[in-house]
Amino acid sequence: MDKLHYSRVMIKLSGEALAGDQQFGIEPAAINKFCREIAAVAKTGVQVALVIGGGNIFRGLSASAKGMDRSSADYMGMLATVMNALAVQDALEKLDCDTRVLSAIPMQAVAEPYIRRRAIRHLEKGRVVICAAGTGNPFFTTDTAAALRAMELKAEAIIKATKVDGVYDKDPMKHSDAVKFESITYIETLEKRIGVMDSTAISLAMDNNLPIIVFNLFEEGNISRVVRGEKIGTIVHGGKND
């Protein structure tokens, strides 16, 4: 691999990425595909942390909208992310990639508790760190968890892996005239209500000037391209001088 642009990154994966072509659940073939890329990047010396959503199993916000208590629904969503984290850990370790799952909700039989210094030490030892159970608190999304953990772990960028190849002014799956942004500022994202990440996550990234790179997860080699600093997808940043 060429010279690396980033030495430590936070990768945010949606739960839907684990479902593959299915509507819900976990599809091993889909997991294996992107885990091969993550393992390859980790073996180059890039320190990799992951936060994975739980939408392929349970969505707390959707359940809340249907009458379930929001806190209870969000805790169920956090547990879904732990299931996804264990699935990704299994796939990575089958690729000889040393991995640790750290959960914000203590469950010592399946994961280590999330402790910032411990997570950093794992990264320094070359282990992929999977941060599970969101922030451990209801009313916060896994987008916010990714931004928070990225700041705590001193990541140099948040890599948001999605099903589309960047950020558009409207949904490119529904609108053929959607326009893609090569770059966009945090403020523009908030003002235009573009759903890159939720507003809390964007605000956290903006306050700490942490770039967010949005790209297509399913195009082979894209994660490697991002860590080399190649211009793919869309970068969300603080302004023209970033």
Image (tube, rainbow, N blue to C red):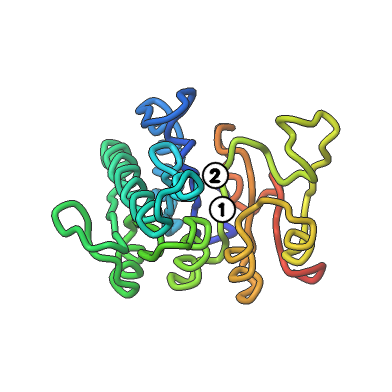
Q: Residues within 10 Å of mark 1 (few under 14, many from 20)?
A: many
Q: Count numbered badges in the picture.
A: 2
The C terminus, quarter of image: bottom right
In the image: residue 105, left or right of residue 37: left
Residue 166 picture quarter = top right
Q: Toward the viewer: 191 or 26?
A: 191
In the image: residue 38, left or right of residue 202: left
Give amino acid for label 2: Ile
SS at mark 1 in the image: strand
| Residue labelled with disc 2 | 223
- For residue 7, say whether it is visible: no
Residue 29 in picture, x, y percent from top left: 39, 25
Mark 1 vs 2: CB contact within 8 A: yes
| Residue labelled with disc 1 | 159
Question: Quick one: label 1 or label 2, which is nearer the N terminus?
Answer: 1
Give the mark toward the camera: 1 or 2.
1
Residue at the (39%, 43%) spot, across then down = 39
Residue at mark 1 to residue at mark 2: CA–CA distance: 8 Å
- For residue 16, say whether it is visible: yes
Residue 158 picture quarter = bottom right
